[in-house]
Amino acid sequence: MILTNRLFERQAPSREAKSLYIFCEGAKREYKYFEYFKEIDSRIKVEVNKLKPDDNNSPKGLYDLAINSFRGDKSKFSLQENDEVWIVLDTDPDKSNSREEQINQIKENCQGKENWFVVESNPCFEVWLFFHQNEKVKEFESDDICKSWKQKVNESYDGGFDSRRHPIFIEEAINNAERNYKAGENERPLKGSSEVYLLAKSMFSVIKNKIRAVKNKL
């Protein structure tokens, strides 16, 4: 088993290290996935906001959470030069069908901010996880596409996707997701596509030597 606390040696942050602040909607899957990278290398600071059940679990709520984290004298974080803010969203529609409009507005807002980015997975975060061990996109005809993706991810990994070990294949996921990426006329990802590879590239630029060194020993 590839456990981060056994195979990775944490290092003190350098003065040149940038921080990545990641805001995601998932209370479990996304949170655990990104925590993997926070734990293996302190040269890059990854902050994941784990939404509580009573938090505003919507794209706008997540965006507001990010904005408020850097606002005012009592802000939770302080942005430095070259730091990046990433908002991770799913395309799966909500009951009020307001999700698409909110995402479009958030993307427009972030385009006006330096080093603020929005990445989507269509329809769910499991699309990104799927590419850690699969080279080709999967298509489903089920009425519940997200449920089908979650089932396919669990079938693709022995015992299901394990956030304590499978994220080490981030380089493979980047290549697979980028190779299979398709966008619609609105420049948003089509079903079976994920923009999370863009965020992964930023993380990997800092941790790639450590990731590759550990993989070579396995």
Image (tube, rainbow, N blue to C red):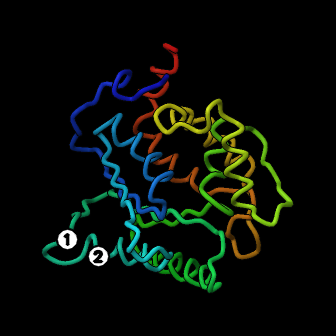
* Amino acid residing under circle 1: Ser
Residue at the location (65% across, 84% down)?
97
- For label 1, the SS is loop
Three-letter code for the amino acid on which mark 2 is drawn: Asn
Q: What residue is drawn where x is 24% and y is 60%?
A: 80
Q: Measure the C-alpha gap from mark 1 to mark 2.
A: 7 Å
- Relative horizontal placement of residue 216, taking residue 74 as reference (left or right): right
Most foreground residue, 147 or 11: 147
Determine whether the residue tagged by mark 2 lies in a helix, strand or loop.
Answer: helix
Give the residue at mark 1. 75
Q: Position of residue 122 (x, y in %)?
A: 68, 62
Disc 1 crowd rating (10 Å Cα; few below 14, some 14-19, many 20+) is: few
Q: Position of residue 66 (x, y in %)?
A: 36, 71
The circle drawn on residue 86 is none
Camera-nearest residue between 208 and 191: 191
At horizontal 78% and vertical 42% (from top left) the residue drawn is 136
| Total marks in image | 2
Nearest the eye: 214 or 1: 1
Position of residue 10 relative to residue 38, above or below, is above
Task: Give the mark nearer the N terminus: 1 vs 2.
Answer: 2
Residue lying at the far top in this picture: please name it.
217
Q: Residue at x 46, y 65 (%)?
A: 87
Q: Are marks 1 and 2 in contact (CB under 8 Å)?
A: yes
Binning the other alpha carbons within 10 Å of mark 2 as few (below 14), some (14 to 19) or many (20 upward) gives: some
Residue at numbered disc 2: 68
Task: Please indicate whether residue 32 sits to the left or right of residue 11 in the image.
Answer: right
Instruction: Please indicate whether residue 143 sits to the left or right of residue 115 in the image.
Output: right
